[in-house]
Every structure is written in structure tokens, then in C-alpha cells.
Image: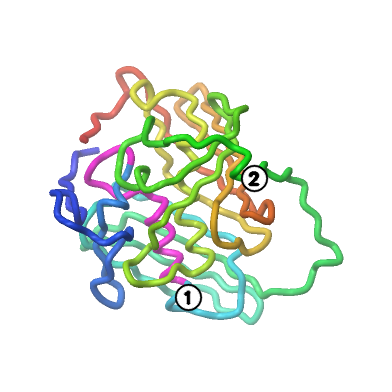
């Protein structure tokens, strides 16, 4: 992939808002340095970008239905600078609906998203969860993701990690003080989602100077709507023998597990490592 210029607000040292994005119009935004990705200086991290796409779905198509699944396919570099987000209803319905959204940089699309929303019903009489609860954040040790990963988004994070962490498996909690858009409150699910794509960097199987393992997608399934605050991860990272990999996480809020996240990885080593710009 070719290098791209860094066009985030704040990249030359000028002040920028304590937020990941600034709204320029109804569907136009510009990225700030806080959204900067971990692999290249001139890209956005998928975590806040996916959160913003879902936030626009929730803002433009409000309703009483619940987000069941949100999937994001990454079609190329999520460029820094100005971009637009388009949202459309694909399958309306009284109990089930499907929405598509995309992030575009001029004529180029970087993210295609699909969101299933389902009508809420009372299923407390049959509820059951097979995932274990995480130890709370205060029971874990502080750690600095920026000791491994570069970029403004990673630098925005406060993190805790369990003492049993090892390469390929870790239990962690994350939070950030920054909203998605300057001057706007995060929609509840989007505010949770804006941290989820960090999972691929939380249980590092190989150091990023030895292997490249960017994810080409993110798929999140919810069993209930998450609450605000810390986002918890029970994450496992697996690499296969032919360049394929997966990061799989059970996601939690302070009340317990809320769903899962899966990321498909393109794994490269040795002479297959791409040239990365910093």
C-alpha cells in the first residue's frame, strides 16, 4: 500500500479539539490527530472510524430497535483529513431492519458497514450467558498500549491488563476521555464500539516490527446493549500457516459480557512485510 500524507488536525503541532473528529456539515467530517492509526501516520484507526459510522447510523435513522450486529469491511487505507459518511436503509421492518453505511474520501470508499437492528422484547425468563465475567478494572494493572503501538488513537487510551496476559491471550479494560465528535455526545452503542477495534493490539502474538497483521474487517455481535465507561476484552489472537489470522474477543461492560468481536487478519512476515510510513 502506498504511503499517504498526514492530514489530521493537529499533525503539525497546531491545537485540535479533544475529540476524534470535527463535524464540517450534515455528513462531512475531518479527522484529528487523536484518531490516528497505529500502522501509518496518515491513516485513521478503525476503532474511532467504526464508532463514528455507527453513530451516524444511530443519529440519522433513530428508532427503538437494538443493534444486534455491526460489521465493517475495510476496503483500503482509512485516510486522514476530510471525508463523508453515507447512510441508507436497506431492509426496513417492524421488528428487523438492515442499514448500510459507508465512509468516503472523495470518490474512494474506505469502509463499508452493515448494521442489523432488532426490536426489543422481554426475554429475561430465558436469558443465559456462557461467557465468564472479567475481573474489574481496579483488579488489573495499568499498562501503556503506546509502549507497543504508535499513533494518536492509541495514545488517547487508558488501559488495564490482567497479570495472566501472554502472547496471544489477554484480558484487558480500556477507556478514553475523548468523544467521537467535538461538541457532541456519543450515542450509547457507538460510544462503546469506538474502542472495540483495539482488540487486535491487546494480546500481541508477535511484535509489530517482526510481523504485520492488520485486520481487514470488524464484526461485533451484541446480546444486550452496552453501558458507558470501561470496555472489557477477553482476547485471543491466532495466526495460521498461510497468512491468515483471527482476533476473537468477548466484550464486556461493568455489568458483564455484552457480546463478541471478530477481526480477520492478513499476516505477513519476512520479505512479505509491507513498507510502512511513520
Percent across and percent down for residue 140 are 59, 37
Percent across and percent down for residue 35 are 32, 52
Asked whether the residues under the numbered discs 2 and 1 touch, taking CB atoms below 8 Å apart as contact, a structural biologist would say no
Secondary structure type for disc 1: strand
Q: Residue at x 21, y 35 (%)?
A: 278
Q: Which residue is mark 1?
A: 89
Q: Which residue is mark 2?
A: 136
Percent across and percent down for residue 69 are 58, 60
Colour convention? rainbow
Q: Is residue 41 magenta?
A: yes
Q: Residue at x 30, y 62 (%)?
A: 21
How many residues crowd mark 1 within 10 Å: few (<14), some (14–19), many (20+)?
some
The image quadrant that residue 67 belongs to is: bottom right
Region rendered in magenta = 38-57
Left or right: 35 as drawn, with respect to 165: left
Q: Residue at x 48, y 31 (%)?
A: 244
Amino acid at each position: 500500500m502506498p504511503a499517504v500524507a498526514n492530514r489530521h488536525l493537529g499533525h503539525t503541532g497546531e491545537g485540535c479539539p479533544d475529540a476524534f473528529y470535527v463535524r464540517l456539515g450534515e455528513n462531512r467530517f475531518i479527522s484529528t490527530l487523536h484518531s490516528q492509526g497505529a500502522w501509518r501516520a496518515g491513516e485513521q484507526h478503525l476503532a474511532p472510524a467504526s464508532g463514528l459510522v455507527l453513530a451516524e447510523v444511530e443519529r440519522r435513522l433513530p428508532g427503538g430497535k437494538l443493534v444486534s450486529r455491526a460489521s465493517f469491511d475495510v476496503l483500503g487505507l482509512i485516510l486522514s483529513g476530510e471525508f463523508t459518511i453515507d447512510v441508507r436503509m436497506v431492509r426496513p421492518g417492524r421488528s428487523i431492519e438492515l442499514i448500510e453505511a459507508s465512509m468516503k474520501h472523495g470518490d474512494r470508499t474506505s469502509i463499508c458497514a452493515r448494521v442489523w437492528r432488532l426490536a426489543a422484547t422481554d426475554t429475561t425468563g430465558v436469558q443465559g450467558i456462557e461467557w465468564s465475567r472479567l475481573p474489574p478494572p481496579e483488579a488489573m494493572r495499568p499498562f501503556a498500549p503506546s509502549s507497543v503501538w504508535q499513533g494518536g488513537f492509541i495514545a488517547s487510551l487508558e488501559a488495564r491488563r490482567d497479570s495472566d496476559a501472554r502472547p496471544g491471550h489477554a484480558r484487558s479494560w480500556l477507556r478514553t476521555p475523548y468523544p467521537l465528535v467535538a461538541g457532541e455526545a456519543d450515542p450509547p452503542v457507538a460510544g462503546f464500539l469506538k474502542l472495540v477495534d483495539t482488540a487486535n493490539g491487546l494480546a500481541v502474538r508477535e511484535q509489530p516490527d517482526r510481523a504485520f497483521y492488520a485486520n481487514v474487517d470488524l464484526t461485533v455481535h451484541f446480546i444486550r446493549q452496552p453501558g458507558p465507561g470501561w470496555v472489557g476484552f477477553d482476547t485471543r489472537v491466532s495466526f495460521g500457516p498461510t497468512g491468515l489470522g483471527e482476533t476473537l474477543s468477548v466484550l464486556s461492560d461493568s455489568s458483564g459480557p455484552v457480546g463478541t468481536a471478530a477481526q480477520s487478519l492478513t499476516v505477513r512476515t519476512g520479505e512479505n512485510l509491507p513498507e510502512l510510513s511513520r
